Image (cartoon, rainbow, N blue to C red):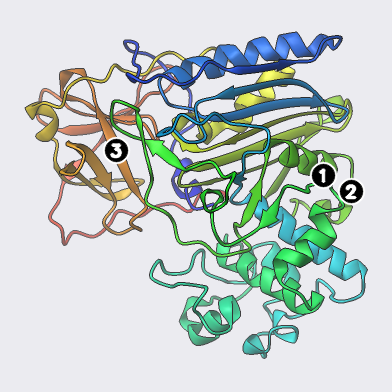
Amino acid sequence: MRLRTLAFCLAVAVSGGAAAGPSTPATPPRVHQQGGDALAGEVAARIDAWFAPLAATSDISGIVRVERGGRLIAERRYGFADFEHRTPHAADTLYSAASVTKGIVAATLLGLRDDGRITLADAVGRHLPALHGHDGITIEAVLRHRAGLPRDFPDDVDMTAVPGGAAGWLAGHPEALRPPGEERYSNVGYALLAQVAAAAAGMPFAEAARHYVLAPAGMLDSRIDIHTADHFARGALPYTAGPAPTGVMHPVPAPLEVGSSGLITTASDLARWVRALARGDHPGLFVGDDPLGSIDAGGSGGDRFVSVQGTLPGYAATAIAWPEDDVSITFVGNLFSYPVLDLDTTLRAIVRGPAPAPPEARPAEVALADAHRALAGRYAHPDFGRVDIALDAARGGMLLRMPERSAYWSFHLTPNVDGALHWRGFDIRFVRDADGVVRAIPRTRGEAVAMAFADVPATAQEAPVPDPEP
């Protein structure tokens, strides 16, 4: 999931300002609550307390679903699957699940191993001749991000048109490879593994994944596809934080490949997947220090949990399950804004407590003024590198772009009082202080930390960006 590249920069915990809200507010939550379950009422109240204020300001959109023993006990739906037509979310609405796909890839490979078609020690080149001779690039090394592969393909590469797919591209770009051994997170690697699975299974990866993983888990509404969910009849449209009156806009799409992403799913199917992981359907994923396939496992005793999550421009998916009492909570959504960055922490608190503090309203949106336009320019940031703030002529607002990054790193900036601009995607406000210095101030609990920006010419070297966790 490519948007995770920046998510390391802050832990999302909102603090306040005046109330803000679009002129076309989100729908009231659609409610399901199962009688007779003591957990249902408490969890439903916690969900409403945290999600409803964010939906009212168009900062969250999607479905929250809680199950016990595979039985739905509480569900809430916020926002719209299609804001333009005010189409509500439904039980069969489809969402892109981004990096959740990696766990499907890993489980498919383990199924092929159990059938005797591969071993994890196999060199990838044994199954993909384009990489013959690269003996250090084994299936297990790629699964554990230790094969020396690059993080992403270049943005101008259309993987549907590359002869030989990921293997062919890597064979033609040996300069992209590093010696295997050291951990180096790689989306490219999981695209490569999807090719390995297809070759070993003798069928397209989408069919292999359905045979080994999706169908056994009961995920009958899910599929693997290179396109995002909006390309399908029941797919939610993707959004990111945007200008009034709706408060949302469509994002620039990210280039995709099957393997690191590609899972299209529903809320109930994602719950089936995380519950399958929690009950031990794929034990091979949990051998070693870290689970395979971007799966997380934590806690101890009766609070052990398994979780999966992923984000793409316009989509977010998170699911957590506790095996000891067979409870799960799932979120699938179609709006990228700051609440989704730390949503796993919030969902755990909703189920296990203590209840997360209700989010305070973000700063009120005001009309764009000269003080906001005066923030236009190029700046250097210690974490994000070069950042451009510019007038968005098409929408009449302000945009943030990263000139050294992909086109989809483009974000609307919401004008606030005192000439400030709010980067809602990451909950950071840009302000010019009394000394004329532009600062980026995260809205975090406790004392805000100012991060100074310095005006630099376009030829200045980009500040280094630390590699985040996947």
Marked residue nearer the N-terminal end (3 or 2):
2
> Callout 1: 10 Å neighbours few (<14), some, many (20+)?
many
| x, y percent for residue 141 | 70, 69
> Callout 3: 10 Å neighbours few (<14), some, many (20+)?
many
- Amino acid type of the residue tagged 2 in the rendering: Asp
SS for dot 1: helix
> Callout 2: 10 Å neighbours few (<14), some, many (20+)?
some
Count how many numbered circles sit on residues in the image.
Answer: 3
Q: Nearer the viewer, residue 26 or 292?
A: 26
SS for dot 3: strand
In space, the residues marked 3 and 2 are separated at their CA atoms by: 42 Å
Q: Is residue 112 left or right of residue 470?
A: right
In space, the residues marked 1 and 2 are separated at their CA atoms by: 6 Å
Disc 3 to disc 2: CB gap under 8 Å: no
Q: Nearer the viewer, residue 222 or 258?
A: 222
**Residue annotated with mark 1:** 277
Q: Quadrant of residue 196?
A: bottom right
* Depicted 196 relative to depicted 53: above or below: below
Q: Nearer the viewer, mark 1 or mark 3?
A: 3
* Depicted 156 relative to depicted 213: above or below: below
Q: Quadrant of residue 351?
A: top right
| x, y percent for residue 383 | 36, 46
The mark found on residue 412 in the picture is 3
